[in-house]
Image (spheres, grey):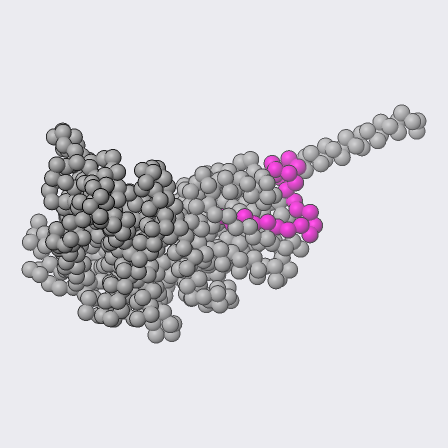
Amino acid sequence: MSLATFIGQLFAGLGLAFVLFFTAAGLNLVWGVLGVMNFAAGSVYMLGAYLTTSVIARLGASALGWTVALIAVPVAVAALGAVAEVALLRRTYRVQDENRQFMLTLALSYLIAGAIVLVFGTHFRTVSLPGALNGGWNLLGATLSRYTVVTIVLGLLVTVGIWLGLYRTRAGLLTRAAVDDREMLAVLGVNVDRLYSAVFAVGIGLGALGGVLIAPQGAVSTNLETTALVPAFIVVVTGGLGNMTGALLAALAIGILQSFAALHDATLAQLTPYVVMSVVLGARALAGRRGWSLTGLRSPRGEPAAGSTAG
Amino acid sequence: MGRSAGASVTAIALAAIVLASTLAGCGSSGSGSAQLAPGATVKIGYLASLTGFCSTFSQEYVKGAELAVRRANEQGGVLGHKLQLIVRDDKATPTVGVAQARDLVLSGGVKYLAGTCSSAVGKSVEQLVANPSHVIYALGVSDPTVFSAGPEIYAFNTIPTAQIEGRNAAAYIRAHPQWKRIAVMSEDYSYGYQVTAAFRQAMRGSGQTIISQDYLPSGGTDYTPYIDKVLAERPDAVYSTVITEDTVTLVKQGLPLGLFSKTNFFGIMDYGTIDAMPQPPVGVQGYTFYPSSSIYHTPFARELEALSPAVANGGAAGDAFNQIQLIVQGIEKARSTDPTKVRDALAGATVQTVQGNVEIHRCNHEVAMPIAMGTIVGPGHALAFAHFNPLRLVDTNKYFEC
């Protein structure tokens, strides 16, 4: 393998990994803190992509249009997420009924998908990039898509932002505490309901951000929902439910391995996420561990979050 | 004549009438009277994949079918019968498609079916309509095995199959013997596999080498690793069967990486996708087997264009239009609404379509639709959107093996 090929595949894999990570991170945050497996994550991702096409259609494919989309779309979708949490999901925490939560998020996913078809129609939509992000850069003989490089940089920034938010802020401290013992946090006078709403909104916003970033890379269609949800679940399960660092490592492993597997066989590349997940789960089972607790949301003891059942 | 003799004559006459009626019934249909009563409506059940795979084009199919029905009714219907379109969602799923078709035929009295974008649905419904229902089914799907049972089937195909498409692509590549190393990029589902298989078979003995074939995930959002991989192999040419909105993704991600500048690219480029691209791959050789109306400039095409450029160029509307037209012309040619007579009248006939007059092959009921090929140019070359210029219509009759 030439150096140029290696660099090309590495960057393609990193681009793939960070888009995966955005949706998975949102899913993981909601699971880790709220104990809710959000089956609407794919629809949220799709909604982010569709709203981006609307913003770009109004403001143009300029730097301004893209900046507005990058900020406004995740914020708007996060706000919708907060409303859904307050109006619907909150009612399910007290009864601790996971089936009800599952059905509720599934229903939400159908509602979002249906609303998208009603508003945007069934035909796919496309948007273009600002001129500066079109084209490629040469690096040691490899041609790198500028947009992929921008996605990687944004991914790194968001990852750092998540880490700072969780480990360098009071809100992050409370969030991590809520994972371990929600009741104790409430006894200490923390408004846990508000904390949950905020966490759910951030999780939804991260998923929408993935949709924003994917929108200019291809056709925005109703197929996006399924193409996002399954890989995101694989990343979350592979990384360890509720483990943010694990999710990042899983996304990186899957993205990069998938990219290099494509050199040998495209079908093998598509199987990569499943192979990685099987290997990791198998290794965990052999080691008798219940999950890696590196520096994620979960407690150092590796105990599952309140309300969760798996680890 | 005595009283008993009169009774005998009456009984014989009645028996003769019953026998004649029975024989007439045997020769037509297995489900009730085959011939419609005068003035009765010709019901056409349309299987549209309103949800599920390929739902992005479902509305185009429906609009094209509606236009054809409206047009026929404005001209007085067919043999004095008005047409009625009944649209059902097959969800691009065989079990749903068969259930819908069965309901239309058994409960709705439908003797004509059309539509679906899914070969799997088409294959299942074809088996249903062949026996025992005897219902005409006009559809446009790529899987040649749907029509492989021979001339007794009641289904008619309105687009070139994957076999024809692969052979045509091979003919184009073979016409460029200087391209020695060929890479193939296909969709990772039956369509992609069938086109690639036909292409490979038709390339045998060409002296050109297929250095790789990659099946890209359908509906994938990131094709960058596959594009990088193909370019790293330094092919002289790339043949792509990546279709519908996946074409948009391939083009968007391939442009900055040099997929269209570092090698000779040739692939399916439907008008509905290239004119939706913010930056179409200008200069690339493309083809489409769908009847995108702007290519043809026929009266049908202008009516399609009046609906909207997206409907006209998507190709699906034109295909659905052709399916309804095929049924109407079959009834006219048979001078009957009996599906078996319509089938026999259509087999081997020449019918009028959006693409002009084309022959229906008697052996497998495939309509020899032309394939449109050309160099992609941007908006401004006589049309307000990206299209082929110069345009070449390939006669696909030479690829049939009847």
Horizontally, residue A185 falls left or right of residue B344, namely left
Residue pictured at 11% horizontal, 59% vertical: A142
Q: Can residue B73 be seen from the camera position used here?
A: yes
Residue B292: in magenta span: no
Depth check, front residue: B46 or B32: B46
Q: Residue furthest right?
A: B2
Horizontally, residue B151 falls left or right of residue A140, namely right
Report which quarter residue B134 is drawn in.
top right
Secondary structure mainly formed by the magenta segment: loop
Up-down relation of residue B89 to residue B253 (above or below): above
Report which quarter residue B285 is drawn in.
bottom left
Residue pictured at 56% horizontal, 43% vertical: B104
Residue B46: in magenta span: yes
Q: Can residue B322 be seen from the camera position used here?
A: no
Q: In the rendering, at what x and y percent does residue B44 appear?
A: 56, 49
Horizontally, residue B383 falls left or right of residue A143, namely right
Depth check, front residue: B332 or A215: A215
